[in-house]
Amino acid sequence: MVEDPGVANFALGLKDSLYLKKINCDVFATGISRNYLRQYKEEFLFSSQITSLQNCYDFIFYGTSEVKNSKLYKILNKFKSEGTKIGIIIDAPNSIDERLKEIKNNLKIEADFFIVADKTTKQELI
C-alpha cells in the first residue's frame, strides 16, 4: 500500500518479480502515488478496493505521506486485528518521523517489521 511517490518506488516491478518466485502480490495505491505508478505503467489497485476484499494477505507493507486524513490507517487496523503482519516502508532518513507517527486519526498502528531504503535510514531508525 503506497501513498507517497518515494515509497511507490518500492512497488516498481514488485508484482512481476514476486510472481516469478510464485508469490502473489497486490499493489494498492492512493494519493499522488497513483500518478507516479501510472507513469511507469505499473499495475495497481485503488486503496478503496482493499476494503471490499477478504483478508487473504499474510503481510502488508505500507508507506504513508503527510496526508493527515489517510484512509490507510483504518484499513491497516482492520487487517492487523485479523492477524496480518504489518510492515512500514521508510524511504529516506528524513521520512522517519513522518512514517512512525504512532497515532493518526486516533488510530494506532504497531509495525511488525520495517523496510528501509539504505544504511543511513537504518542507522537513523535505530
Image (spheres, rainbow, N blue to C red):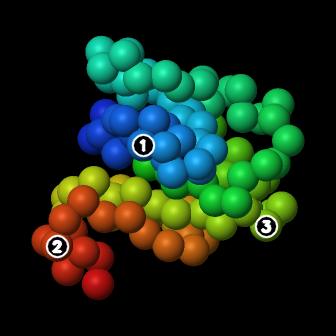
* SS under mark 1: helix
Q: Quadrant of the C terminus?
A: bottom left
Residue that badge 1 annotates: 17
Residue that badge 3 annotates: 83
First in sequence: mark 2 vs mark 3: 3
Q: From what the image shows, is residue 59 above or below residue 70?
A: below
* SS under mark 3: loop
Could you say which quadrant of the image residue 97 lies in? bottom left
Whether residue 105 is visible to the viewer of this picture, yes or no, is no
| Mark 3, other Cα within 10 Å: few <14 / some 14–19 / many ≥20 | few
Residue that badge 2 annotates: 119
At a point 83% along the width and 61% down the height, the residue shown is 82
Q: From what the image shows, is residue 76 above or below residue 14?
A: below
| Amino acid on which disc 1 is placed | Ser
At a point 27% along the width and 54% down the height, the residue shown is 91
Observer-nearest residue: 121 or 105? 121
At a point 65% along the width and 66% down the height, the residue shown is 85
What distance separates the C-alpha of mark 1 from that of mark 2?
23 Å
What distance separates the C-alpha of mark 3 from that of mark 1?
25 Å
Mark nearer the viewer, 3 or 1: 1
First in sequence: mark 3 vs mark 1: 1
First in sequence: mark 1 vs mark 2: 1
